Amino acid sequence: MTEPRTIVITGASSGIGLAAAEQLAARGDRVVLVGRDERRLAVAVDRVRAAGRGAEPGQFQANFERLADVRALADHLLSTYQEIDVLANNAGMVAMSYRRTVDGHEATIQANHLGHFLLSKLLRERLRGSRIVNTSVRPGPNVRLDPDQLDRDGQRYNGIAAYQTSKAANVLFAMEAAQRWPDILSLSLHPGLVRTDIGRDTALRFVYRYAPFLISPEKSARRLVRLAVAATEELTNGALYGPGNPIRPDPRVFNADNAARLWAASESAIADPAT
């Protein structure tokens, strides 16, 4: 019998993350759920336990708007799991008004990119021979990302643009990780337009819940599960995937120079002031 794999999913207390956790648990994998809300995380654990026919999932409460939480999460994972087969960097949020985190960064870029960049770096050695899957989106034609200006100016802040920038960063992160960490399969995922509660604290909640063109979290999660379980030779390191073959984003933004510059800027942004 094949030993169950250990799969860590951030943003696993609802939406795509929870649906993927249930599907993976049903396959017999050992799933570790990460969420920021204690109550919703507890409900998610019950659902994943049921999907796994009683197998107890792991869990950890962390808010990616706090880099101290990310470091605590990494410490927990490293001390608890000798192997991590998949890290699904899935947690995401939309902030329609400008705010800075306790770490001094614009909230959207930290929650959606910098926190996952830090987590991946802290787990890097444990992920040798494994894979990272970053939940992103298909980049739109107007997406902009300046690696030297990750923290947007509050005077000209646009929540949707900040979200698109953070998701573009997810794609560039996977591209550069494939170059720097060739022993880890690094991928990014376009989940489709999904009915989730990602905009729960904004007016966008009505769009993400009720728009008729949205697909279900369960259907979208199958894309994430595919990237988590497919044979390595079936996937291209550093690529962005939707339901089928790799998506080729605009090379004017998604190129090796921007990927390397983003990596350097991200390393500077997550530097631990205590060291």
Image (tube, helix red, strand yellow):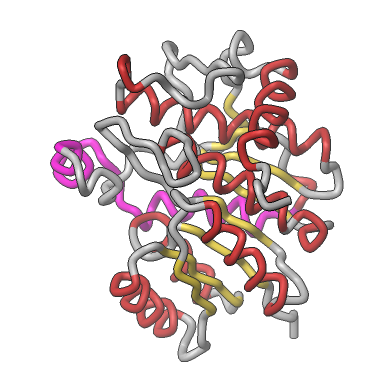
Q: Main secondary structure of the magenta part?
A: helix
Q: Quadrant of residue 127?
A: bottom right
Q: Residue at x 58, y 79 (%)?
A: 28
Closer-to-camera residue (166/218):
166
- With 160 as the anchor, is 103 left or right in this view? right
Specify the farthest residue to the front: 274
Taking the image as shown, residue 18 lies to the left or right of residue 98, namely right
Q: At which x and y percent is residue 92? A: 41, 46
When the figure is inspected, residue 122 is found, relative to residue 104, above or below; the finding is below
Q: Tell me what residue is drawn at x 40 percent, y 55 percent.
A: 16
Magenta highlight range: 203-231
Quarter-wise, where is residue 142 in the image?
top left
Q: Look at the picture and state if 7 lies above or below 241.
A: below
> In front here: 190 or 215?
190
Q: Is residue 46 above or below residue 76?
A: below
Q: Is residue 263 magenta?
A: no
Closer-to-camera residue (140/259): 259
Quarter of the image where the N terminus is located: bottom right
In the picture as drawn, the residue positioned furthest to the right comes out as 183
**Is residue 223 covered in magenta?**
yes
- Residue at (71, 71) in percent of width and height: 78
- Residue in the foreground of this view, choosing between 21 and 10: 10
Residue 265 x, y percent position in the rendering? 66, 28
Q: Position of residue 38 (x, y in %)?
A: 34, 72
Q: Which residue shows up at 34% across the image and 22% down it? A: 154
Q: Where is residue 32 shown, x and y percent of the image? A: 55, 72
In which quarter of the view is residue 229 placed?
bottom right
Q: Is residue 192 above or below residue 227?
A: above
